[in-house]
Image (cartoon, grey):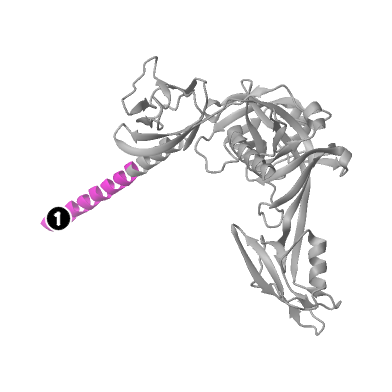
Amino acid sequence: MINLKKKQSRKWKAYRRFLKIVLTVTLLTILGISYKQIYDSIPSTIRLKAGVEQILDLNVPVEGTIMKSIGSDRAVEVSEQGESNIPSDSIYINLNNAVSLMANDTQAYRMNLKLFGFIPFKQVDIEVIQDMMLYPVGRPVGIYVKTDGVLVIGVGEFEGPDGKQQSPAKYLLKSGDYILKVDGVEVEGKDQFIQTVEESQGEKLVLTVRRGEEEFELSIRPELNQSAEYKLGVWVRDNAQGVGTVTFVDEQGNFGALGHGISDVDTSALMMLKSGTLYQTEIIAIKKGSNGTPGEITGMIEYSDRYILGEITANTEKGIYGVCSNELWENGVGEALPIGLKQEIKKGAAQILCCVGKEAKYYDVEIKEVYLQNNNVNRGILLEVTDPELLATTGGIVQGMSGSPVIQNGKLVGAVTHVLVNDPTRGYAIFIENMLETANQVAEEQAKKDAS
């Protein structure tokens, strides 16, 4: 009897220990999820418009300080419910309440935050930018880009004159590499590169290659194939073309389009741009999207100087950028709109400006989610097409609509970038501030080139 009681006691103790472990793990999991939700609800970078009062309403149990910039009286004016709390060396901020922020100068500041006011939590950069107006476009264009050098899309084998398999480029080159020079001579295109290899007479060639951010040289010896032609055993590409949508034009005639970069269809690598052009395009067919099958806008592109709409100067992960022609500037832009920053975007009704017929029109959508802290810069907004006319025509978002401006409360807030393959009524959009950040960098780099 005593042994039985001891066994039961041990079982209860083991059971209680097990329950404590389960409860502890559950509590830690809940705390971890809550911590991540709070962390993700605060963007790592907050942009403010100079001279414009803006409300930051995150409703999170976080407090902290905005540090003054060197040589200024105060960094940012802050008020909570009509009151200000400005210590001598920094500005106090409580994100548990709606906070009004205003800065007069285009500078950068830092906000140091603490969870519940005492647990070190997160550092947030504050960038003050000039408020500006942009002209939304929403017009489809033909896009042609030429690569810097040639892009290696595959490495393989070929049969030599003796019947043996040859693969000179194996272990030397790989998909995604860019061949920039051969024996110090710049590669202008695919045809020139092929001709250079064929004329090598089997002598070693020194290739200048870019792989990611690295640039290096390697030696490679072409081999004869069965047609007595010297080859390297690589497939290369020097251009890409397609249809996309122009998002905006600024007052200087600079445009932004697509909201994502142009990547090679085989390697998925962002194409290194040597030159690029926008052309007029006429929509000739629309393939309606359905579950599991993305739709597509097909356009007829006229590759002629008389149909040029702009010059592409940069291909980036946040879109393509350049200078538009007078034709696009005079006939392809809508009424100028102010920009809306990500903290101004709300769930609910919005519109996209796109063209699935003769002219660009506004169509109704609903913003379902706003991801303030999203490492994927092209997917900050989740939206759903609700407009009956657009749904009847396209089924939702289709390829070719990338770059369509997203407008909410009279402000340009983003651009369509992706469709959900399993639900073509839904898709993602990039914040317009992300596109503008890159557009400004491109403009600055171009100005430096023009000055040199």
Whole-percent x, y for residue 353 in the image: 72, 28
Q: In which quarter of the image is residue 279?
A: top right
Location of the N terminus (image quadrant) = bottom left
Query: What's the residue type where badge 1 is placed?
Result: Lys
Q: Main secondary structure of the magenta part?
A: helix
- Residue sitting farthest toward the bottom: 162
Q: In which quarter of the image is residue 93?
A: top left
Do we see residue 333 in this rendering?
A: yes
Q: Is residue 2 magenta?
A: yes
- In terms of depth relative to the viewer, which is nearer, 170 or 323? 323
- In terms of depth relative to the viewer, which is nearer, 404 or 448? 448
Identified at 34% across, 34% down, the residue is: 115
In the picture of the structure, the residue carrying the numbered disc 1 is 6
Magenta region? 1-27
Q: Is residue 183 magenta?
A: no
Whole-percent x, y for residue 204 in the image: 72, 76
Q: Is mark 1 on a helix, strand or loop?
A: helix
Q: In which quarter of the image is residue 333?
A: top right
Location of the C terminus (image quadrant) = top right
Identified at 66% across, 51% down, the residue is: 270
Whole-percent x, y for residue 344 in the image: 54, 25
> From the viewer's perspective, is residue 28 above or below residue 175?
above
- In terms of depth relative to the viewer, which is nearer, 416 or 388? 416
Do we see residue 419 in this rendering?
A: no
Relative horizontal placement of residue 170, taking residue 188 as reference (left or right): left
Relative horizontal placement of residue 427, taking residue 93 as reference (left or right): right
- In terms of depth relative to the viewer, which is nearer, 322 or 280? 322
> From the viewer's perspective, is residue 5 above or below residue 65?
below
Whole-percent x, y for residue 240 in the image: 77, 51
